[in-house]
Amino acid sequence: MNGNGTSQAKTGFKKDQVQRHIEVDKSLINLMLNSRAAIEKLLELGLAVEWFDPVHKNIVDAILMEYESTGCLISRDNYRRMLLDAGLKGDVMLRLSVWDKCSFVLGLVCIEDLGMYYRELKNNFLARKMHSYLYEFGEEVKKSGYLQATTSLIEKADSAVGLTDIRPGIERERISVSQYKDEYLAWLTTPRKESVLSGYPEIDERIPGGFTPGHMTIFCAPPGHHKTNMMINLALRMMKQGHAVWYFNLEDSSNHIISRMIAHETKLPLSKILKKELAPDELEQVADCFGKLAIEVFSPTASVSVRYIERLLRVSRQKPRVIIVDYQNCLAPLTQRVQRNDLEIGETLKELRRMGKRYGFAAITAAQLGRDAIRRWRKESSATPDTADLLGSQQYGADADCIFALRQDEADAHALKVWTIKARYGIRTPFDLHVDATTCRITSGQDASGITGACDVEAEGW
């Protein structure tokens, strides 16, 4: 550990590299201690406390808290008081010594150099992270092999880059309502047809604003009650409205997912397609169908997290309006938490919402039901589901905009009961859809027709 609290062994940096990192941190902190204009500019650029060396994070956080609450620069006495109020009495002298070193930086620190320091700060942050990740990569190779270690390295590196990827115009995230009139009226008068709708009147009544960027809808059901079919039907209906749809198939093979889409569009029995028993004219129907299926299907062979989706979004020229994840429980957690699956789910959902707002898509996914809920549903045909029935229920209830529960009627194989567990802005009454398991088609009660027999393929959602 050097005099500034940074471990050279841990970062893998040479002494002069560590010293430059510290100098950049101290120069920026010096500017923030002495200039409100510097703080304003850094906030406008999107400064993140995480970019600073750990030894400096506390003082930066204090500077920003003081400025955001009072509009004033923080004094040494106020910083000392903050430390005491936070119960850091034993660390006060050490942290105040860091303050003193930042207050009296050798050489001239000019606000004109703020942009240069800001760029160096982000670069230094990534350098520290990557040196640490590369060390961890070597250790993980010994334990798990190159494939898993490389996947983990990519995930970590992408996460670090994401923390520094501040897009231009970030200041527009903070608006003065009194000055927002023109933009709001423009939004208010935008024709409804530009909204992403489900194509099901029953669902659209419960999502009156449409599937907007950052909106999250979750479908839950017992095994075999059409979660996947529901999401495929939504994908196809949204595609036919002219919207770009990405479908992440994390559980099944690409052939099986596409087979369901083919069955839906051609009305050929899914079992016949999967058994490869099609007549020549039916094969021609299938071939003709592909030109109409403008959906991007992703079927990663390894376990992936939402970082995989974000990497694809970054390099894609055409961004999707809707991303469907089949299904959420198959996503790898961003952070492994022993016996806290609910926190893993919550972190994933929050990240999906954040990405949706940033890249302009609505998210649709499915969730598992708990065993107790499934047993209750099997015993009581009239049982009403709620958020407590979902695995990781607290997180789903907090982060989703809409949650629907699906259940096929035992007395009528074509009746699909849908409960609205949560609707942030719409009505919450249950409704019925019609399902034709043979062709994977789910239709609205207002347009149901051509219902045929049940599918003879036994698999979840078929």
Image (cartoon, grey):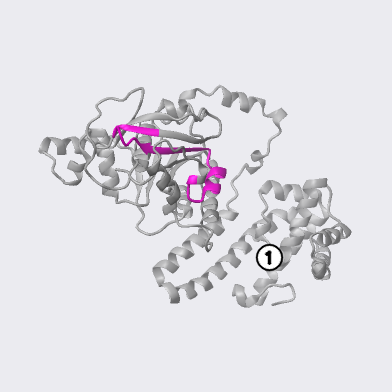
Relative to 194, say whether 282 is above or below. Answer: below
Please name the amino acid that badge 1 sits on.
Answer: Asp
Residue 182: give x, y in percent of width and height: 64, 25
Inspect this view and state whether residue 370 appears: no
**Front-lying residue, 169 or 460:** 460
Q: Going by the image, does 308 lie left or right of 282?
A: right
User: What is the number of callouts on the image?
Assistant: 1
Q: Which residues are magenta?
A: 389-417
Residue 186 lies in quadrant: top right
Q: Is residue 56 magenta?
A: no
Q: Label 1: which residue?
A: 53
For image coordinates 35% across by 33% down, the residue present is: 416
Residue 367: give x, y in percent of width and height: 44, 47
Q: Is residue 393 magenta?
A: yes
Relative to 18, say whether 348 is above or below. Answer: above
Q: Going by the image, does 112 lie left or right of 185?
A: right
Residue 376: give x, y in percent of width and height: 42, 45
Q: Quadrant of the N terminus?
A: bottom right
Residue 90: give x, y in percent of width and height: 81, 70
Residue 2 lies in quadrant: bottom right
Residue furthest to the left in view is 280
Q: Helix or strand or loop: what does disc 1 sit on?
A: loop
**Front-lying residue, 127 or 218:** 218
Q: Quadrant of the C terminus?
A: top left
Inspect this view and state whether residue 70 appears: yes
Callout 1 crowding tier (Cα within 10 Å): few <14, some 14–19, many ≥20 = many
Residue furthest to the front in view is 379
Residue furthest to the right in view is 77
For image coordinates 42% across by 31% down, the residue present is: 198
For image coordinates 25% across by 43% down, the residue present is: 259
